[in-house]
Image: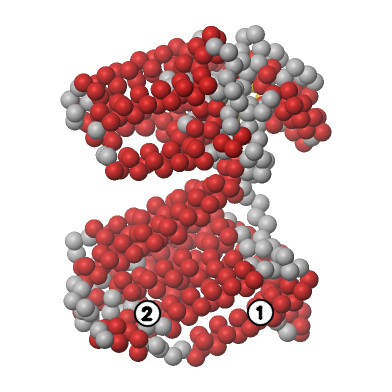
Amino acid sequence: MNPTLDAALRSWPFDPWLLAMLTVSAAVYVRGWNRLRRRDPQRWSFARLLAFNGGLAAMYVALASPIEPFASLLLQVHMLQHLLLMMVVPPLVWCGAPLLPLVNGLPRAIRREWFVPLLRSQALQTFAARLTHPLAALPLFTAVTWLWHMPGLYDAALRQPWLHVAQHVSFLAAALVFWYPVVRPDPARPRWSPWLLLPYLLLADVQNTLLAALFTFSDRVLYAHYEQVPRLAGISALADQQGAGVLMWVPGSIAFLAPLLWIGVRLFLGPGSAAGAAPRSPRVAHVAQRTKQRSSAAHVPRPAFDLLRVPIIGPMLRWKHTRTIVQLITAGLAGLVIYDGLYGPQVGAMNLAGVLPWIHWRGLLVLALLTAGNFACFACPFTLARKLTDRWLPAGRAWPRLLRNKWSAVALSALFFWSYEAFSLWDSPWLTAWIAVGYFVMALVIDVVFRSGSFCKYVCPIGQFNYVQSLVSPLEVRVRSAAVCESCTTHECIRGAATSPGCQLQLFLPQKHGNLDCTFCLDCVSACPTANVGVLAVAPTAELWSDR
């Protein structure tokens, strides 16, 4: 047997205090879980029991298996230990919804005299709610992670056992706080919108990637301790450090991005994911009835700022030909990109296909989203052909019911991001040009075959990106007064009028909140007979806080 492997198998440290603590916790949880399961077996399933005890088992493996002694000899093993404590143990523990089982598993006297009064404390509840809010949990998690990986403090923790214990405790505590809003264990009832979890997990992955890159690409050993200890299996200290960086990078990113994908899919599909481009009349009647029933709650006071009432800018945006002119300009630029990409110099920095879409357009997109809204879709040249198809061709078919969700756009987005890296699109003008051509063809074919709006709502990956990012924008297309809409019986904003087709993405303005699926086409502005639609100022990220 390999000597290193043999030493690993024999190196099981005995930690009676840890073993006793985990055993008591498991026993109390099982006792409380049994009591709760007798009352509600569907709610307290075996999956929760397995998750909680799996988290305790992972903690034992991290702290009382050969991982513990070998962590001081190999940075890769130490990184594995930290990943278990921060990425595996907390989600499993929270998936077990431990609060109620642990409280119910305690002896009655202890539960009544100590824990129930403590849990009922308003100050404690307020503190816990603020601490586990994403805006507090993410900075805490990031600060603890980066602080303990500073070379001086990391080396000190390896030298001082008590400091090493403090490191592990702080890692575990910060991770429990971080994963609480992601799992939201029963009976948690957060008041913030679940949409906030998308940037929450994405930013967590970004900070993890940056820290992992420091380990992976550094040309010097960061921690002096690992240069001084005996090297195992012939692995140099620098190679060990690079391996630790890869371990933090790949499994760490999976730990953040897997729940991000799961949560994102559930939010995009929503409870009414089968709804889509259904016949308009029943939908209009249904949402109109809901509007009348909730009229008192739906009233929104007129904001102080409306972009459509700003001199010069407002009339220009309200003019029915403005969007067409802007789209013609961007279509001309797209034509130049395609021509130069196919026939110009095949060097990204010297070609319009390498400069306009990948540098200037992306920069303008970010500025527009942060300062105004989804005006990138307003200027989109790919839907210019829709005006011609709507005027000269008969109405197309309804988009297939099975595809009335965001899966197609998600798949195309994944394909694009893979292609971007695999083929270095930013430095390939020829491929960039053909992508633009393909986009024009795809938009034209879908808008000819299917009813207008299907491409934007269900297929376009660029549009989906713009929709989500516009949640942080300060402007929103919405009604100025809900009371005016209550008396409206024609609903031109969605049905259309002689001057405008109405919202082709089937967004009923009195019920619309946020910028999701809104292309800022302003057709609803032209169609509204009472001029009750504006581009109003809203609190940026408001939809991330309150999902109405």
Horizontally, residue 536 falls left or right of residue 110, namely: left
Q: Residue at x 60, y 81 (%)?
A: 25
Q: Residue at x 48, y 37 (%)?
A: 409
Q: How much space separates mark 1 and mark 2, taking CA atoms?
A: 28 Å
Give the quarter of the image for residue 5. bottom left
Query: In front here: 158 or 393?
Result: 393
Q: Residue at x 70, y 13 (%)?
A: 529
Q: Amino acid at mark 1?
A: Val
Q: Position of residue 502 (x, y in %)?
A: 63, 18
Q: Quadrant of the N terminus?
A: bottom left
Q: Residue at x 41, y 30 (%)?
A: 365
Q: Taking 292 as reference, is 229 above or below it?
A: below
Q: Taking 391 as reference, is 256 above or below it?
A: below
Under circle 1, the secondary element is helix
Query: In front here: 435 or 99?
Result: 435
Q: Position of residue 222 (x, y in %)?
A: 25, 67
Horizontally, residue 156 falls left or right of residue 43, namely: left
- Whether residue 390 is visible here, answered yes or no, is yes
- Whether residue 380 is visible here, answered yes or no, is no
Q: Amino acid at mark 2?
A: Ile
Under circle 2, the secondary element is helix
Residue that carries the numbered disc 2 in the rendered image:
67
Give the quarter of the image for residue 543. top right
Marks 1 & 2, CB-CB < 8 Å contact: no
Residue that carries the numbered disc 1 in the rendered image:
30
